[in-house]
């Protein structure tokens, strides 16, 4: 039996996959992720960087960011922390004053049992139960 191949992805791959700003890079990203013999791990920091990059550089709104991540979740060869991402997306869509990063941090704290997330960010502390101001 062949040993499973697992590789990690960088933000640049996801950004290229999400947009066709550079057709060559988009095509390379699509081809890379078409290798179903390899599992591609997406670290949480890459989720944060990708969400921010899509909003800042490509004017993705919150719903478009969520749709992109939902498409990734459906791919059998993409290893994303599903529970973390789903909780983050739920909060991200429900609380428009919070950034993706805020929602990701709060959900990571909740999932790891390291709550509350202490923050000086009033919006975050006032909107999510898993965060509070010290």
Image (spheres, grey):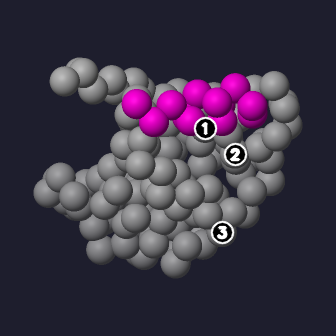
Instruction: Tell me: residue 85, above or below residue 39.
Output: below
The picture quadrant where one finds residue 111 is: bottom left
In the shown orientation, is residue 15 left or right of residue 85?
right
Q: Position of residue 129 (x, y in %)?
A: 30, 74
Q: Secondary structure at mark 2?
A: helix
Q: Is-magenta flag for residue 33? A: yes
38 vs 25, nearest the viewer: 38
The image shows residue 79, relative to residue 121, as above or below, that is: above
Mark 2 vs 1: CB contact within 8 A: yes
Q: Which residue is mark 3?
A: 63
**Label number found at residue 126:** none
Q: Is residue 50 left or right of residue 88?
A: right
Measure the C-alpha gap from mark 2 to mark 1: 6 Å
Q: Is residue 112 left or right of residue 108?
A: left
Residue drawn 75% across and 26% down? 25
Magenta segment: 26-37
Q: Residue at x 43, y 43 (%)?
A: 78
**Residue 29 visible in the snapshot:** yes
Q: Quadrant of the C terminus?
A: bottom left
Q: Which mark is residue 18?
A: 2
Disc 1: which residue: 14
First in sequence, mark 3 or 2: give its number.
Answer: 2
Picture quadrant of residue 44: top left
Classed neighbour count for the residue bearing mark 3: other residues with Cα under 10 Å, few (<14), some (14–19), many (≥20): few
- Mark 2 crowdedness (10 Å alpha carbons): few <14, some 14-19, many ≥20: many
Residue 89 lies in the magenta-colored region: no
Q: Secondary structure at mark 3?
A: helix
Quadrant into which the N terminus falls: top left
């Amino acid at each position: 039996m062949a040993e499973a191949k697992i590789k990690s992805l960088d933000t640049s791959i996801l950004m290229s996959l999400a947009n066709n700003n550079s057709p060559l890079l988009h095509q390379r990203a699509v081809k890379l992720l078409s290798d179903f013999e390899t599992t591609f791990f997406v670290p949480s920091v890459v989720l944060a960087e990708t969400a921010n990059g899509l909003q800042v550089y490509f004017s993705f709104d919150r719903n478009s960011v969520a749709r992109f991540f939902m498409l990734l979740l459906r791919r059998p060869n993409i290893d994303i922390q599903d529970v973390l991402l789903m909780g983050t997306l739920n909060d991200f869509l429900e609380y428009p004053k919070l950034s993706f990063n805020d929602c990701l941090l709060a959900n990571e704290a909740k999932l790891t049992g390291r709550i509350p997330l202490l923050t000086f960010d009033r919006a975050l502390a006032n909107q999510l139960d898993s965060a509070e101001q010290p």
